[in-house]
Amino acid sequence: MQRFVDFVNEGTVAAGGLAYEDKVRTAVSSALKKMKVVKSDLYLKPDEAGGFDSTVVDMYLSLNGKEVPIEIKMDKNAQMGGSSLKFDGIKWTLAEKGLKNIDPDTQQLLIAAAQDKVGEYKKLMTHLKTYEPKALHKNITQIPFRCTKPAWEKAVAAGKLKPTNTTVKFNTKFIHDWYAGKGCYYIQIGKLGLFYLKNNPLNLPIPQLSGEIEIYLRLVRGGASMLKTGEFKGENVSTVNLRAQGKLKLKGRSNLSLDNPTDCEKIFYNMLGIK
């Protein structure tokens, strides 16, 4: 479950997301116990990711010795997969994970959206150069960039960040491709149920996740740290990245849900080929 603090109240959403994951895992465990499934055929793997590892998904089943990754979202408003964009002063590229996991057409969509705002990004970078220590801020010509926490906060207070924000509407192909890059083809969404993503390798009787998403482009300041050496020793400095983050806009529902033990049984019998 990735967390993007500039978009949501991180603590509240994180706690709610973990509570929902626990609810799903409890329902899954209850169903497997009732079914008395042989462990080597199907079982729930222990949660070893700590809830916030963006390189893995939220839950793994083992089916006949093979992993079945399942992403879990608290509700349809949960933040979905995303990437960072980099700007060298002339052209845009995606961060390595985005280049690997997001299809070329979607990459171009994100880059086009960022290029549309390039003038605003440059205005913000120019504005940050007016703050002390100017010798540090003079190097702000690319994204990501470093600046002091006070300089960033002053720029935000002056309204310089707001014009850089933008939203792109796109279909759920963005989400499908992102999770396919992690080898994940199933997603459980609170109040909506279980969906398959890019493919349905287990041929489960569930619908494909469809609809629209909104891709938000936001400059996000990371945590600040005090410089301990060098010319700017003692300055509280942060790195600012440009994040592309998807948010679901769905209307449909699935007919089965992993937070319901009875539905879990139906899903698992289907996985095992038992009617």
Image: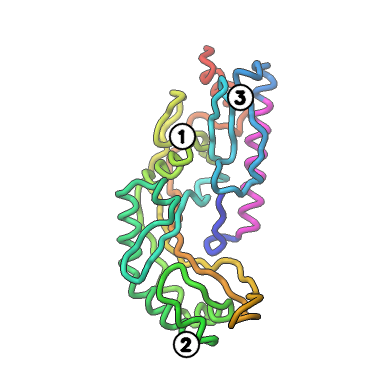
Asked if 64 appears above or below 54 in the picture, the reply is above
Q: Earlier in the sequence, mark 2 or mark 1?
A: 2
Q: Is residue 269 in sight in this rendering?
A: yes
Q: Nearer the viewer, residue 142 or 79?
A: 142
Image vertical order of residue 33 relative to residue 163, above or below: above
Q: Is residue 71 magenta?
A: no
- Indicate whether 241 appears above or below 186: below
In-image side of 31 versus 136 (left or right):
right
Question: In this picture, which residue range is highlighted in magenta?
Answer: 10-30
Give the number of the disc on residue 262: 3
Categorize mark 2 by other alpha carbons within 10 Å: few (<14), some (14-19), many (20+): few
Q: CA distance from mark 3 to mark 2?
A: 62 Å
Name the foreground residue: 69 vs 158.
69
Which numbered disc covers residue 185? 1
Q: Magenta includes 22? A: yes
Measured from the top left, where is residue 73 in percent x and y?
A: 55, 44
Which numbered disc, 1 or 3, marks the residue that appears first in the sequence? 1
Instruction: Locate residue 168: give its quadrant.
Output: bottom left
Amino acid type for the residue under numbered disc 2:
Thr
**Residue farthest along the front direction in this orientation:** 230
Q: Earlier in the sequence, mark 3 or mark 2?
A: 2
Query: Which amino acid, by three-letter code, is at mark 1?
Result: Tyr
Label of residue 130 in the image: 2
* Residue 190 seen: no
